[in-house]
């Protein structure tokens, strides 16, 4: 009888766990060492997935040189500089060009629909936060488009 009570109690606890914790939640959280992850990335403009949360991806990318002008119809993007700096060029509604320097420890949010291109004179490490559906080249498909991102 004692064993049956123990089994019942354990199954109630397990049932409670199932109800409280969605099945896709990992039981163990893992920290990520950003420097280690960036050390594995050799090619500029080829972002890698570091983590996923709430339909968003945390991507790591190295920028060097000019990227392509593009926009994202449905997604905002956040660019956080970990090392170095880059210039975000963008066009307003009248197609006038502007730019903003993003330095180490700073970030910028590019709203959906804004035509933009990052430019890095020297290698720059950037963390991107954006919806999983975001294509790195937005509305443009060319040699820099990465349709399937790899995890790092």
Image: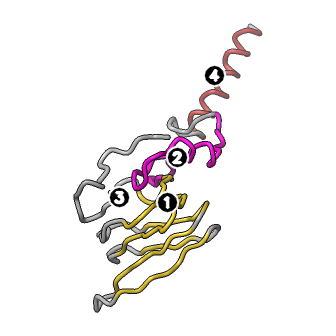
Residue at (47% x, 67% y) in the render: 120
Q: Which residue is mark 4?
A: 11
Mark 2 or mark 3, earlier in chain: 2
Q: Using the image, tell me which numbered label, if any, was put on residue 114.
A: none
Mark 4 or mark 1, earlier in chain: 4
Which secondary structure, mark 4? helix
Q: Which residue is mark 3?
A: 136
Disc 2 to disc 4, C-alpha distance: 33 Å
Mark 1 or mark 3, earlier in chain: 1
The nearer-to-camera label among 2 and 4 is 2
Disc 4 to disc 3, C-alpha distance: 46 Å
Which secondary structure, mark 3? loop
Taking the image as shown, residue 130 lies to the left or right of residue 14, namely: left
Q: Is residue 31 magenta?
A: yes
Q: Which residues are magenta?
A: 28-57
Question: Looking at the picture, how far across and down is residue 122, in whole percent?
Answer: 51, 64
């Amino acid at each position: 009888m004692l064993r049956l009570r123990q089994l019942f109690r354990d199954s109630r606890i397990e049932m409670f766990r199932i109800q409280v914790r969605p099945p896709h939640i990992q039981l163990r959280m893992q920290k990520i060492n950003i420097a280690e992850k960036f050390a594995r990335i050799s090619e500029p403009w080829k972002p890698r997935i570091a983590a996923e949360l709430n339909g968003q991806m945390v991507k790591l990318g190295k920028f060097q040189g000019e990227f392509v002008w593009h926009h994202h119809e449905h997604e905002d993007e956040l660019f956080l500089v970990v090392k170095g700096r880059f210039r975000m060029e963008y066009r307003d509604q009248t197609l006038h060009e502007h730019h903003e320097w993003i330095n180490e420890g700073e970030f910028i949010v590019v709203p959906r629909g804004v035509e933009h291109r990052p430019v890095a004179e020297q290698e720059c490490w950037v963390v991107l936060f954006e919806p999983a559906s975001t294509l790195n080249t937005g509305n443009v498909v060319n040699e820099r488009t990465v349709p399937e991102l790899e995890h790092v």
